[in-house]
Image (cartoon, rainbow, N blue to C red):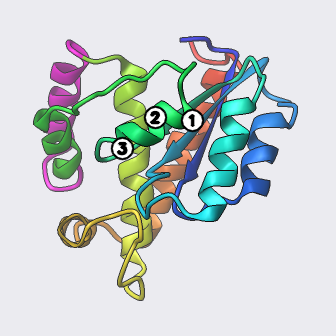
Amino acid sequence: QDSQCEIISMEGVKVTLTDLISACESVSLLAENKVVIIENFFKKGLTKDKKEMVTYLSQLKSDNQIIIWEDSEIDKKVLAKYFTKNRIVTCNIPSNVFKFLDSIGMLSQSEIVKRFHELNKTYETEYIYVMILRQIRLLIIVSDRQVKEIPSLFSWQLSKLTNQSRYFNSISLISLYRQLYTLDYKIKLGLTP
């Protein structure tokens, strides 16, 4: 939980080798170290481009942490072939975390804060924060009514997000996201009490 750490989050379905190299090798102006999080990298399978990126990642020599976050388990053959020297952690996110995220906007502020504190007894504040940030980002995407599909989500997830987004207007979602971003920035610079 290093406060001198920059977190870079990338969508695995959209990431390119150039994006990955830039995220992993560029020098951070805000922090000493970086954590690069790639969500749902293997969602669409292991294409030729993905194989190049996996090869790059498996040969990368860096002090930065690279986290590949998947909604489902990664094929064991892929892990055995490309990630033999890496630490593999399988995590199942408990349903109470998703219930909390799904309730944002639907319950009163006091009830949300109460549930946050209940979750915080079991989970790190940073973990809950990242999950809230992800949820708000997804809500912003689906609040644009022209979006019919998000490649990294299943249709049932998109449907739940669409229903939840009706409790917000796009301005309030963007404002909330900016507040979370500002908090993240202050934490990284050590400007929080």
Q: Nearer the viewer, residue 75 or 73?
A: 75
Report the residue at 83% width, 35% height from top: 25
Q: Which mark is residue 104?
A: none
Neighbourhood count class around disc 1 (C-alpha, 10 Å): few under 14, some 14–19, many 20 upward = some
Badge 2 is on which residue?
79
Separation of marks 3 and 1 at Cα, in angstroms: 11 Å
User: Magenta segment, which residues?
Assistant: 104-122
Q: Quadrant of residue 7?
A: top right
Which of the two labelled residues, at mark 3 and mark 1, occupies the earlier sequence position? Answer: 3
* Three-letter code for the amino acid on which mark 3 is drawn: Asp
Q: Of helix, strand and loop, which one carries label 2?
A: helix
Instruction: State if disc 1 and disc 3 touch (CB < 8 Å).
Output: no
Decide whether residue 2 is among the magenta residues. no
Report the residue at 50% width, 51% height from top: 41
Badge 1 is on which residue?
82
Task: Identify the residue at the far bottom of this view.
Answer: 146
